Image (cartoon, rainbow, N blue to C red):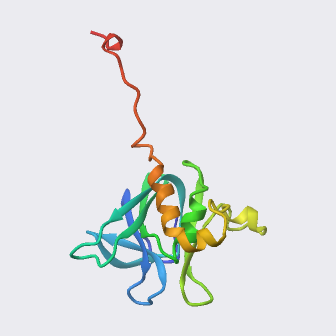
Amino acid sequence: MALTNTTEGGNSKYINLKITKTIDTEKPAFVLQEDFKNTDTSYKEVKGKLKSLSSSFTPKGATNKYDTYGAKIQLTDGDEIYSIDTTITNGTKDLLNGLLSVAVGEEVTLVVYENKGGYQAGCAMKDPSAEAKEDKFYKSFFPWNDDYKNNFKDLIYNELAGRKTPEQEAKSEVSLSDVPF
């Protein structure tokens, strides 16, 4: 199991996680969800091969005060699939920006933490034990500049929305003459 920093997560094949604050410590973490509700089980780190990365959008409505832009990350580790949901916020922008540079099938370690200012932060790492920054972290997909600083939510969402997950890729058509009778 590639989840670390807390107790075991069980024998599930499909594990739902959400990047949010823990119930007891109010620290950012990957919180295990069961029946769409947060549990007391949380992890600081998730490691696996990138399976898919896609966008989500929830319009303003009865339960939402604002439009919500989100991302869904799927990692595989052996026979387990980690499905991670998050919104695109200041706390997740660096993690998602780095993750945009990761190829499907490539191993990645996702980490969330509280930064020096006391805010949620996260990153996508290729080799957590590496010394050099370029060997340790994935390069940001969008360079840090004023446009990224002011419009990161739109930039990340639009890039994710433009990508197709492996399940969404067009399948080749089969001609009737190719079907054996």
In the image, 61: left or right of 144?
Answer: left
Q: Residue at x 41, y 35 (%)?
A: 170
Residue drawn at (68%, 61%), measured in percent from left and top? Answer: 139
Image point (63%, 88%), residue name:
116
- In the rendered image, residue 161, in percent from the top left (x then y), is placed at 44, 54
Using the rendered image of the protein, determine whether residue 58 is visible from the camera's viewpoint.
Answer: yes
Classify residue 31 by image quadrant: bottom left
Number of numbered markers: 0
Q: Is residue 172 above or below residue 21?
A: above
Outermost right residue: 132
- Between residues 130 and 179, which one lies in front from this camera angle? 179
Q: Is residue 115 above or below residue 103?
A: below
Q: Position of residue 129 (x, y in %)?
A: 71, 68
Near-viewer residue (16 or 147): 147
Tell me the quadrant of the picture where the C terminus can be found: top left
Place of residue 122 in the rendered image (x, y in percent of width and height, measured from the top left): 56, 74
Counting from the top left corner in percent of width and height, residue 58 is at 32, 66
Left or right side of 44 for 170: left
Query: Residue pushed farthest left?
Result: 62
In the image shown, does 55 or 50 lie closer to the viewer?
55
Q: Is residue 63 left or right of residue 95?
A: left
User: Is any part of residue 1 visible from this angle?
Assistant: no
Which residue is pictured at 37% across the width and 56% down the height?
13
Going by the image, does 92 lie left or right of 173? Answer: right
Vertical arrangement, residue 102 with respect to residue 2, above or below: above
